[in-house]
Image (cartoon, rainbow, N blue to C red):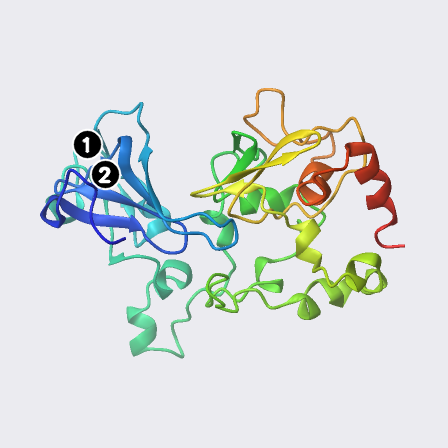
Amino acid sequence: MPSPPEDKDWNDISYVIGGFAWKARFMDKEGYILTGDKFRQYNLANQILKTASTWTGYDASKTPRKPYTCGVCHTTGWVQSGPEGPHQNNLPGIYGVWYADGVTCEACHGAGARHASQPEQVQLSIEENCGDCHRRGNANKIDASNGLIRHHEQYEDLLASPHRYIKCTACHDPHQSVKYQGNGFKGEQNTCNTCHTETVDSIAAKAKFQCTTCHMPRVAKSAVSVKHQAKIGEIAEGDVRSHLFRISTDPNWKMFTDDGKFVRINDEGKAFITVEYTCLICHTNKDQEWAIESAKRIHK
């Protein structure tokens, strides 16, 4: 971000939260997160959605100072406390303490001091624990808002998908980013096509579409979203890909609950992406009936 919030200078800011790929939020000099209806969140430009960088509000309904409690996923060695402390750097707005800023090796592998001195005797963890952070609240519910899945819901997505028993590392290199050509995604030849060999020769493949184009549409939002004007009405597109994979061709299935707060899940715990997001977000002049019939033929 080029500057701090409009009504502040850098001397008023203790920490910046985020600032990579999607957005940045700000903590005042006592460690409270700045909230308000404008100039509280900086959204980075998004080349895919063609949105420019912009300032927006954040938690305008909250009090002007919101305690920082997000360290479990944004720091290493976080220990939650409360208003009574202890507080990182003695800043009363930070309800906890941490060992290192950001997500370092030890955030996933555990403390490494003893391993460094006794590598043969003291082993670090190599258990996958992505779901500790890429989730929100109840893992059996996928939170939604304003027609899109809320951010860091990938673990809940996966549990409601056909890939619930596949590890994240089957598709991701956890030491690389999926943003800015970071090679965090291993590529479809090393992931989708290793199992779904029968679907490679398809209409989609001939059109040079990727599996992720339709099976992982951007139906989640971290910072920004856009609205597409379609024949059936407005369709939202977010800045984070879904990990639900399964597409529904049931004309009566609705992706979100009636109150819009969650992704709809059936009695078997399965969730589905509907054709509005897989087909009609591009084929804006078509209707649901066309999309459903076309989707049934896409791999035949």
Which is more toward the observer, 97 or 185? 185
Relative image position of residue 144 (x, y in whole percent)? 53, 32
Asked whether the beta carbons under mark 2 and mark 1 sit within 8 Å of each other, the answer is yes
Relative image position of residue 129 (x, y in whole percent)? 49, 55
Residue 270 in view? no
Quadrant in which the C terminus appears: bottom right
- Spot the residue most to the right: 300
Label 1 crowding class (10 Å Cα cut-off): few <14, some 14-19, many 20+? few
Number of marks in the rendered image: 2
Relative image position of residue 78 (x, y in whole percent)? 29, 49
Q: Amino acid at mark 1?
A: Pro
Query: Which residue sits at x=68%, y=45%?
Result: 282
Q: Which residue is mark 1?
A: 83
Dot 1 lies on which element?
Answer: loop
C-alpha separation, residue under disc 2 versus residue under disc 1: 6 Å
Which is more toward the observer, 151 or 277? 277
- Say which label, 2 or 1, has the lower sequence index: 1
Q: Which residue is mark 2?
A: 95
Q: Quadrant of residue 167?
A: bottom right
Judge left or right: residue 215 versus residue 150: right
Query: Which residue sits at x=84%, y=51%?
Result: 298
Which is more toward the observer, 8 or 247? 8
Dot 2 lies on which element?
Answer: loop
Above-or-below relation of 181 to 261 = below
Above-or-below relation of 245 to 37 = below
Query: Which residue sits at x=24%, y=43%?
Result: 26
Residue 212 in view? yes
Q: Quadrant of residue 29?
A: top left
Above-or-below relation of 198 to 260 = below
Q: Amino acid at mark 2?
A: Tyr
Which is more toward the observer, 120 or 195? 195
Q: Quadrant of residue 27?
A: top left
